[in-house]
Image (spheres, rainbow, N blue to C red):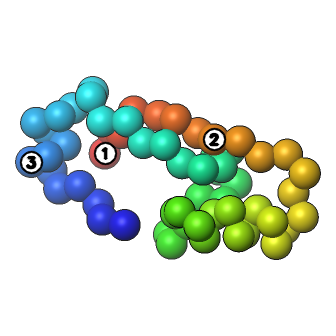
């Protein structure tokens, strides 16, 4: 996973949407993306999960 640079953020400000495969802040942070999130949710024995959709601001 790659972070967007300031030029990209400035150019697309208010128009970049991030979809994270868990209900943040649970299972978020460094290295938590894609299949890793799903594996962590299952390993934690969670019975409820979801998705977080938000505009990227920084």
Per the rendering, the mark at residue 25 is: none
Q: Residue extending furthest front?
A: 35
Separation of disc 2 and disc 1 at Cα?
Answer: 20 Å
Q: Is residue 36 left or right of residue 41?
A: left
Q: Residue at x 81, y 66 (%)?
A: 42
The correct choice, above or below, for 6 with respect to 54 in the image is below
**Residue 29 appears in the rendering:** no
Which quadrant holds the C terminus?
top left
Tell me the residue that label 2 is attached to: 51
SS for callout 1? loop
Classify mark 3: residues with Cα within 10 Å, few (<14), some (14-19) or many (20+). few
**Where does label 1 land, which residue?**
58
Separation (CA) of disc 3 from disc 1? 11 Å
The image quadrant that residue 4 belongs to is bottom left
Report crowding for label 2: few under 14, some 14 to 19, many 20 or more residues within 10 A (C-alpha).
Answer: few
31 w.r.t. 56: above or below: below
In this rendered view, identify the residue nearer to me: 21 or 7: 21
| Residue 16 appears left or right of 9 | right
Q: In the rendered view, does 28 fall on the left or right side of 31?
A: right
- Quickly name the residue at label 3: 7
Q: Nearer the viewer, mark 2 or mark 3?
A: 2
Q: Are marks 3 and 1 in contact (CB under 8 Å)?
A: no
Tell me if residue 8 can be seen: yes
């Amino acid at each position: 996973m790659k972070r967007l640079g300031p030029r990209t953020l400035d150019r697309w400000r208010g128009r970049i949407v991030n979809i994270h495969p868990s209900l943040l802040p649970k299972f978020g942070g460094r290295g938590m993306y894609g299949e890793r999130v799903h594996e962590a949710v299952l390993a934690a024995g969670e019975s409820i999960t979801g998705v977080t959709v938000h505009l990227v601001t920084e």
